[in-house]
Image (cartoon, rainbow, N blue to C red):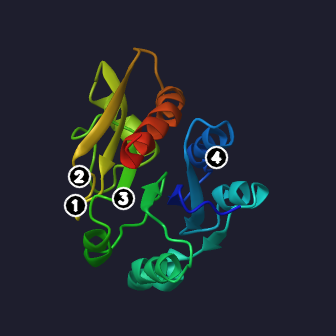
Amino acid sequence: MFNKNKKRIAVLVSGGGSNLQSIINNIEQGNLNCEISYVIADRECYGLERAEKHGIKNVLLDRKVLKEKLSDEISDILENDDKKTDYIVLAGYLSILSPEFIKKWSRKIINIHPSLLPKFGGKGMYGMNVHRAVIEAKETESGCTIHFVDTGVDTGEVILQMKVPVLSDDTPEILQKRVLEKEHVLLIEGIKKLLGK
């Protein structure tokens, strides 16, 4: 049921969608007062199946087919929907959005990144690459960051961060699990801040 008083978010995904699931769960439990307008993926992924299971509109925009037109396609979908999308949440989304798109949605797009930015951000720093780099640098702590998306890669204003310890026997996989648990919590807090709640 469409409620015009609730803010609506589009969630962009590229992978398993566990952060998306956290958003869905928190909405269903009444802990997050918004609706998901769309789930948009840039490749075939389990995130789309999660959206389908919960009856959320979802669309695959293949980055390999659309290439530099990807951001335009996202714009078309969000702007031609009669139910307005207010914000965009990047939840493990790996494609780079165009500068024009980012300017149009200035301060309305947030991203979750699996490190304590500005450390371990930028080109090539995603997924397991981040956790591997953290361990190789012999860091004693890592974590995750919610930030506004700007035209740089992982350079937008930091909104919230949550820390985890890096243990001496950590593998990238073990560290990833520890960070991901915090991501599921921090993302909800970040969305609440965005909604002004």
Q: CA distance from mark 4 to mark 2?
A: 25 Å
Q: Is residue 11 left or right of residue 102?
A: right
Q: CA distance from mark 2 to mark 3?
A: 10 Å
Q: CA distance from mark 2 to mark 1?
A: 7 Å
Q: CA distance from mark 1 to mark 4?
A: 29 Å
Q: Earlier in the sequence, mark 1 or mark 4?
A: 4
Q: Position of residue 90 (x, y in %)?
A: 45, 55
Q: Which residue is mark 1?
A: 152
How many C-alpha atoms fall within 10 Å of the one at disc 2: few (<14), some, or many (≥20)?
Answer: some
Q: Amino acid at mark 3?
A: Ile
Q: Which residue is mark 4?
A: 24
Which is closer to the viewer, label 2 or label 3? 3
Q: Is residue 2 visible?
A: yes
Q: Is residue 159 left or right of residue 131?
A: left
How many C-alpha atoms fall within 10 Å of the one at disc 4: few (<14), some, or many (≥20)?
Answer: many
Q: Earlier in the sequence, mark 4 or mark 3?
A: 4
Q: Earlier in the sequence, mark 2 or mark 3?
A: 3
